[in-house]
Image: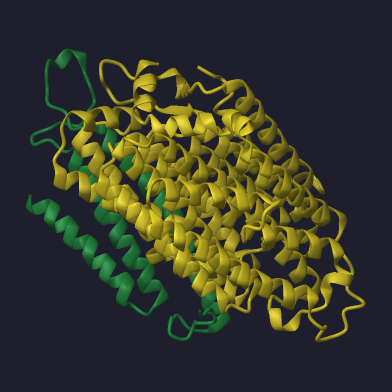
Chain colours: A green, B yellow
């Protein structure tokens, strides 16, 4: 149970960062922290105590395996996370070239 | 088993890759391939629409159906509701793409634009077809990541800022959705929507159920820009190139936001009275606040973006009323009206909001400004733009011969039949406010005295004009759906999917 709670705390740390940080790069990092807390939860969902890696060998008799489906989902989600982070960084760098700053207080053309 | 279903995703994906590879080598390759792709998709959607006839089809990816209760099969499901969404997506996609042929000529890297456009369409088609939650998430990310890139396509100051804001909020929404999917897998040991429904039908803990529903409402609410979650929409939709604004406002927020919400809450969860009230209330709030926020806008595309929020409110409210009425159980006719009105307004909104954004794009194309105060007197020099935008404005504010009137009327009649008098009154009031700010748009853009010399301004080029005229004709033609016998054949299959929510899972598991 304590592990799940720690994941949730990590999620909240990321959320706090997204809300309070004023630096574009730090916002991107906070989003990544949130993302990884969710990946951890997904992996934990498939975990079984004493479970082995799910490589089924017919000779070795009955064994306990961890659930492989969440692991496959996490791999896919990590790839998607990579794409979003790369996109976010590309935009942040372009913004830096236009405004010469990463501070969101100085990047505010859009109002109302 | 229908072998044509995966083509909706595969076809645009393949042409997106081909365009990036060959676009630089062969001149004009992308301008040729992209419209053909979208045209083929539209024909395919119409063919499926005519051949489906109220049944539902499933396609198991790679022939894997899952054995002995293992949740390994991935299904693409085509039924009455998703086929209507496919028709809208590919129709608006084709028109916006045709419009881009001359609008995007001033930008560099055209091949990338058309490639991203095809990816966004592939993602949306996938979301609409997907019968399994995780696949839905993947397709959703495909379409929203390409929309992040397309919003920033102009790489000016405002475009980049809007795209960053959109990405942060969109990323947050994706996290919430992924968390909800993980939790559902934890409880049900499956991510197939039909099997999840069967698992929920048996037993579930109430607290868990509500937590997952709240996560999903906030996640997809952020994607659909329902009001407490709307902050990104006016920036993103006004900064994108105009054909992309038409795609985002016209279909993206419906396909990845509202469609998924409706599909999950009708066909995956067993709906409860509370959730109906929450959905109807969110809809009513966005309907009212969206229109109030739109009044004071002087940027044409910002005004249209806020009005999107307000019109989305109508659709969400109609479905919320549908849930409450279905649960009451004594007035199915009103529930059918509410849900039918929601679907009808969804189709109409895609058409007229797409048209209005294309009009705004034409104004920007010729005048290089989006500020209403700098326009005026354009009805003489741009007659086609003026006429089509007048038709769309009248349609969105609900003036009789146009389609918007009938769909709003159906929603209001359903509200009165179901004894939601407050919601009916609000819907009428918002319709009047909508008329107000669209008259402002018409007056300042087309009918006022000109601020500067407008004689030199000419009508937009042929592809742009054709797309606008086509959508304007649709604005009138879609009124025909109000005739009972027509709506019986067109809308009824979609309504049936939603008013008998348990059939979705029973027929699918049966396959």
State the residue in front, B490 or A97.
B490
Viewer-proximal residue among A71 and B324: B324
Residue at x-position 68% and y-position 60%: B394
Asked if one can make out residue A60 in the rendered structure from this viewpoint, the answer is yes
Q: Position of residue B227 (x, y in %)?
A: 41, 64
State the image coordinates of residue B55 (x, y, percent, origin top left). 50, 21
A106 w.r.t. A26: above or below: below
Front in this rendered view, residue B358 or A45:
B358
Q: Quadrant of residue B505?
A: top left
Residue B206 spot, x, y in % from top left: 15, 43
Count of marks overlaid on the render? 0
Name the residue furthest right.
B456
Looking at the image, the residue that sits furthest to the top is A59
Q: Is residue B206 left or right of residue B40?
A: left
Picture residue at 39% right of the left edge, 27% below the top: B504
**In-image side of B497 versus B330 (left or right):** right
Near-viewer residue (B32 or B456): B456
**Residue shown at 33%/56% (left/top)?**
B218
Can residue A75 be seen here? The reply is no
Residue B202 percent across, percent down from the top left: 18, 28
Left or right, B34 with respect to B129, comes to: right
The image quarter containing residue B45 is top right
On screen, residue A16 above or below B341: below
Q: In which quadrant is the C terminus of chain B drawn?
A: top left
């Amino acid at each position: 149970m304590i592990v799940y709670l720690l994941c949730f705390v990590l999620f909240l740390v990321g959320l706090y960062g997204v809300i309070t940080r004023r630096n574009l790069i730090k916002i991107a990092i906070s989003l990544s922290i949130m993302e990884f807390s969710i990946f951890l939860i997904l992996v934990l969902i498939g975990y079984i105590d004493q479970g082995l890696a799910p490589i089924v060998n017919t000779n070795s008799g009955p064994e306990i395996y961890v659930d492989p489906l969440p692991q496959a989902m996490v791999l896919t989600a990590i790839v998607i996370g990579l794409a979003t982070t790369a996109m976010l960084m590309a935009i942040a760098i372009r913004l830096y070239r236009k405004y010469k700053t990463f501070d969101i207080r100085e990047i505010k053309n859009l109002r109302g | 088993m229908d072998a044509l279903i995966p083509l909706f995703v595969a076809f645009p994906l393949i042409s997106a890759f081909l365009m990036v590879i060959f676009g630089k080598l062969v001149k004009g390759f992308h301008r040729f391939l992209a419209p053909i792709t979208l045209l083929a998709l539209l024909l395919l959607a119409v063919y499926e629409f005519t051949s489906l006839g109220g049944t539902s089809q499933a396609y198991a990816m790679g022939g894997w159906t899952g054995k002995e209760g293992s949740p390994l099969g991935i299904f693409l499901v085509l039924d009455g509701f998703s086929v209507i969404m496919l028709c809208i997506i590919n129709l608006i996609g084709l028109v916006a793409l045709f419009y881009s042929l001359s609008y995007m000529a001033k930008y560099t890297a055209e091949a990338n634009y058309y490639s991203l456009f095809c990816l966004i369409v592939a993602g949306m088609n996938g979301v609409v077809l997907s019968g399994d939650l995780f696949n839905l998430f993947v397709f959703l990310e495909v379409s929203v990541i390409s929309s992040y890139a397309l919003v920033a396509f102009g790489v000016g100051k405002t475009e980049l800022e809007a795209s960053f804001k959109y990405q942060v909020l969109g990323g947050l929404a994706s996290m919430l959705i992924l968390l909800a999917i993980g939790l559902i897998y934890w409880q049900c040991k499956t991510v197939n929507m039909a099997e999840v429904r069967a698992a929920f039908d048996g037993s579930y803990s109430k607290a868990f159920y509500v937590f997952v529903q709240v996560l999903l409402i906030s996640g997809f609410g952020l994607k659909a820009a329902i009001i407490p979650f709307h902050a990104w929409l006016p920036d993103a939709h006004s900064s994108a190139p105009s054909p992309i604004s038409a795609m985002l406002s016209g279909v993206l927020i419906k396909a990845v936001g509202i469609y998924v919400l409706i599909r999950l809450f009708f066909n995956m969860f067993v709906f409860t009275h509370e959730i109906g009230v929450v959905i109807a209330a969110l809809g009513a709030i966005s309907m009212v606040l969206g229109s109030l926020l739109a009044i004071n806008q002087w940027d044409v595309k910002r005004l249209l973006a806020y009005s999107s929020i307000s019109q989305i409110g109508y659709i969400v409210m109609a479905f919320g009323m549908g849930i409450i009425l279905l649960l009451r159980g004594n007035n199915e006719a009103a529930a059918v009206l509410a849900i039918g009105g929601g679907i009808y307004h969804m189709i109409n909104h895609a058409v007229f909001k797409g048209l209005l954004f294309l009009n705004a794009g034409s104004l920007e194309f010729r005048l290089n400004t989006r500020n209403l105060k700098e326009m005026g007197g354009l009805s003489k020099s741009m007659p086609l733009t003026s006429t089509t935008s007048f038709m769309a404005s009248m349609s969105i504010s609900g003036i009789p011969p146009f389609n918007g009137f009938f769909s709003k009327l159906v929603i209001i009649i359903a509200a009165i039949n179901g004894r939601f008098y407050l919601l009916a009154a609000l819907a009428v009031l918002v319709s009047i406010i909508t008329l107000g700010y669209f008259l402002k748009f018409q007056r300042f853009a087309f009918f006022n005295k000109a601020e500067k010399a407008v004689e030199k301004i000419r009508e937009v080029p042929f592809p742009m004009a054709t797309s606008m005229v086509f959508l304007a004709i649709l604005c009138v033609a879609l009124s025909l759906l109000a005739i009972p016998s027509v709506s019986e054949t067109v809308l009824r299959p979609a309504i049936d999917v939603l008013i008998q929510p348990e059939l979705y899972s029973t027929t699918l598991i049966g396959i």
